[in-house]
Structure formats: structure tokens, C-alpha cells
Image (spheres, rainbow, N blue to C red):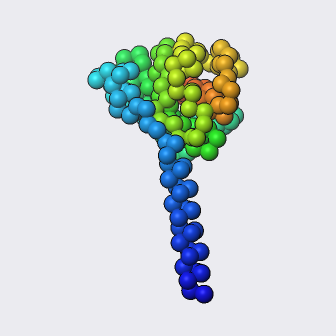
Amino acid sequence: MIYLRMKTLLNAMVCTLCLWLSASAFAEQYLSQSDFLAQTLGAQHSAQVLWLSAELRNKLKDDLNYVPQGARLRYWQAEQKRAWILDEIGRDEPITMGFVIEHNQITQLRILEFRESRGYEVRYPRFTEQFSAIHLDNKRSLSQSIDNITGATLSVNAVKKAAKLALYLNEQVELSSQ
């Protein structure tokens, strides 16, 4: 009887370990945050903070259907360029993306870390280059359509949502600095 309980417990522990290892096996960091900032903004960039007031939280919820976690969002700036590093859930796990925005247009998008089991194709330049020169239109939508990737719809949607968020946040920083 004790042997049976121990065997069941051991099987449960092995299954839990296998699930944990398989979930973490898909996580892959392509570029560190510091490397992204150095490559896109250079050495002379400074960290900034956008405080999420109640008014801004309501705007984010109403305009983008986005509910931010925390009281602030960090971004980095060098001259006219701003970099935003955002996480957005693909299917189950967050995708970490870096956006460089200049004159309220995306100039560069990089996938920094991908943790899902599928949909990793969003990291390739063939996909990310579609976001170059995109801005928000009057309806708070991306100014150009983005081609989907078969089998990666949730990852594509996550990148598009994060792009809208980065552009919107950048607009808010522009408005507050005027």
C-alpha cells in the first residue's frame, strides 16, 4: 500500500517536471533588452517613465481595449527616437517585443523573446519589416494592413496589438511634452 502511494507520488512529480521542462524548452531569447537599446538608440539613450494616470488608463481601455498592469511604463529615448519594450500574450505566454518610434511612426520592430510553442515566425524580418513606417490612423488602427502567417495567427495578433499600444503610448508622451 505504501509502495503504491510512493509510486503514484513519484509519477506525479515526474509528470510535473516534464511539463515544466517542455514549457520552458520553447522560450528563446533572441536579443537582450540592453543589446536592443544599444543597437537601436546607441549608447547615449536615457530611461524615461510614463505614469499611468486614471485618465490615461481609461483612454487605454476605451481606445485600445488594453488594461495596463502597474502604475507606470518605461521607455527609452535618444534625440527624436523612443524605444518601447512591451510584452503581449500570444496564445498562452508573453512575447517580448521592442519597438523604435520616431515622428510617431515605427522605424523598427524586433522580437526579443518568444515563449510559445508555435508562431515563432513573427521574429523573422519578412514579417517585422511590414511594420516599418506604420502609424496610427484616426480610428486608432494601424495605417497599413499586416499579412498574417499561417499557423501563427495569435502571435501575429499579439504583435499588432503591441504595435498599436507602442504607437498610442508614444503619442501620449508627445502630447505631454508639448
Q: Residue furthest left?
A: 43
* Residue 55 at x, y percent in the picture: 60, 37
Figure quadrant of residue 161: top right
- The quarter of the image holding the N terminus is bottom right
Q: Residue at x 37, y 27 (%)?
A: 37
Q: What is the count of numbered marks?
A: 0
111 to the left or right of 39:
right
* Residue 133 at x, y percent in the picture: 55, 12
Q: Residue at x 44, y 36 (%)?
A: 29
Figure quadrant of residue 49: top left
Residue 68 seen in the current view: no
* Residue 102 at x, y percent in the picture: 47, 16
55 to the left or right of 176:
right
* Residue 11 at x, y percent in the picture: 57, 69
Check the image and report above or below for 107 versus 6: above
Q: Nearer the viewer, residue 13 or 91?
A: 13
Q: Residue furthest bottom?
A: 1
Residue 80 seen in the current view: yes
Q: Nearer the viewer, residue 31 or 67?
A: 31
Figure quadrant of residue 116: top right
Q: Residue at x 56, y 23 (%)?
A: 167
Q: Residue at x 55, y 83 (%)?
A: 3
113 to the left or right of 150:
left
